[in-house]
Image (cartoon, helix red, strand yellow):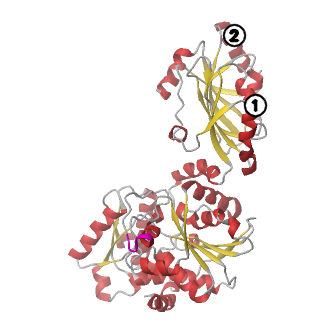
Amino acid sequence: MKDQLIREILLARQRVYSLAPATPLQSLDIRLGFECFIKREDLSPINAYKWRGAFNRMSLLSSEELARGVVTASAGNHAQGVALSAEKLGTHARIYMPLSTPKMKQASVKRLGGDQVEVCLVGDSYDEAASEAKRVSVEGALIYIHAYDDLYVMAGQGTIADEIAMSGRGPFDVVFIQIGGGGLAASIATWLKEIFPSIKVIGVEGEHQASMAAAVAAGKPVTLDYVDVFCDGTAVKQVGEHTYPICQSVIDEFVTVTNDEVSAAIEVLWNTIRVIPEPSGAMGLAAAIKKQDELQGKKVVTILCGANMDFHQLGRISDTSGVGSATKQFLRFRIKEESGELLRLLEEGLSELNIVDFQYGKTHNTESWPILGIEGSAEELEELPVRLNGIGIDYENVTSSPDVSFRVVPFHSGLITHPYFIQLEFPERKGALHDFLNSVKQSANICYFNYQYTGERVGRALIGFEFPGENQRSEFVAGMSSGHWRFRAFQEVSLDTLKRITG
């Protein structure tokens, strides 16, 4: 089948380039010890590569088949490719998508296809949507346009490899290709090995998505019990019957990347070329960064396969990118519940490190367990345990703990005396938290602290103070109002309100 795929990639050129030109192969200026190139499929007509296969397949339909229309299933990018192709070829496309498909992707499908498409939302997963789409295709005698398991779809995707080979940047030593159903990997790997026989092909799969590696291990496609959907463009439970044997023969190694590692790669792409891909679009770079020690001095290609992401996913990516790059950790400390202990922790244990998250609520009269998000170089974080152990501060790494991820900040209101809760605004710079704690250590005890870095010039925190008596509380409030503490309190929060917020 590989020989037939090579022939069809050659034939796909004319059809694919009648719709859109080649996308650039861009050098990534980053000091990883190897030369890295990014194939910019985010600059294609649908901001992802899927249009190539859809248009190539649909261009081969007869006039009678085009008149009847087509049907497909997709969680996003393939749907947009089919919609664009339907509009260009003058056929009708019925597109089945899961009910959970982001509205941004639904809107893009309708915008690209116009009156030529009908979006049908069915089921909670791609598999459920695909099952219904295939049923309708049989009943209505409509051509089903598969997202990956089709020779002509694969051939269309293979023009990406043709463009890489024709870029004049080769020969290349290694290519990283993300795998969902396997169509992209099968076609690119087949063509690149034809042009550069010595190239090493590494297939990249997401955490809890490694369906191709599972198929290779089992000797046949198998169905995963669970598929993580953070990298939704590659979230496939079972690889294709056609893609599996090709990938088995042309992929030299499989690598799995975590969601945090993908988030870190997205941050790298933003910091270097100001691009924010969808998670699956950054998987190749994530794997290259993960294996950088093995790539020293080599010429490497990765595929930025798409940039269609729901805007609201950016928050999670930002939160976890530092974890994925080994520059951010969350630690839960055990210290005395008394004034000045937090300041000692910062001065003796965490000096020179950035505090990017602070979660703490008073739950005990003599001990406290604040959680701090700490950012620093990989070397600094590796040395941190020695420093903390040296000053006798107990801690545990809670980076992956659900209560940290969901920001559950417990506190016992019955333990708090004469409270004062405020939203505080302060300069977002290294040492600002230390300066604040130092300024209030003689006047108040902190009983609640909820802060998260947002990338703005100012930081905002919800902070609770407690006092031994009402006079001390009044003096502190007056000092805060007069600007004595050099930090801006812009809204007071009642204890009852905080109890409702935190439960």
Q: Does the magenta stretch include residue 439?
A: no
Q: In which quarter of the image is residue 145?
A: bottom left
Q: Nearer the viewer, residue 4 or 248?
A: 248
Residue 33, compared with residue 373, is above or below; it is below
Residue 387, compared with residue 65, is above or below; it is above
Residue 32's x, y, as percent? 73, 65
Q: To which residue does mark 2 refer?
A: 472
Q: Give the range drawn in magenta.
A: 217-221
| Residue 129 in the figure: left or right of residue 482 | left
Q: Quadrant of residue 243?
A: bottom left
Q: How crowded is mark 2: few (under 14 residues within 10 Å), some or many (20 or more)?
A: some
Q: To which residue does mark 1 refer?
A: 391
Residue found at the far left of this picture:
139
Q: How crowded is mark 1: few (under 14 residues within 10 Å), some or many (20 or more)?
A: few
Q: At x 52% / y 15%, what residue is drawn?
A: 414
Q: Nearer the viewer, mark 1 or mark 2?
A: 1
Q: Distance between the residues labelled 1 and 2?
A: 32 Å
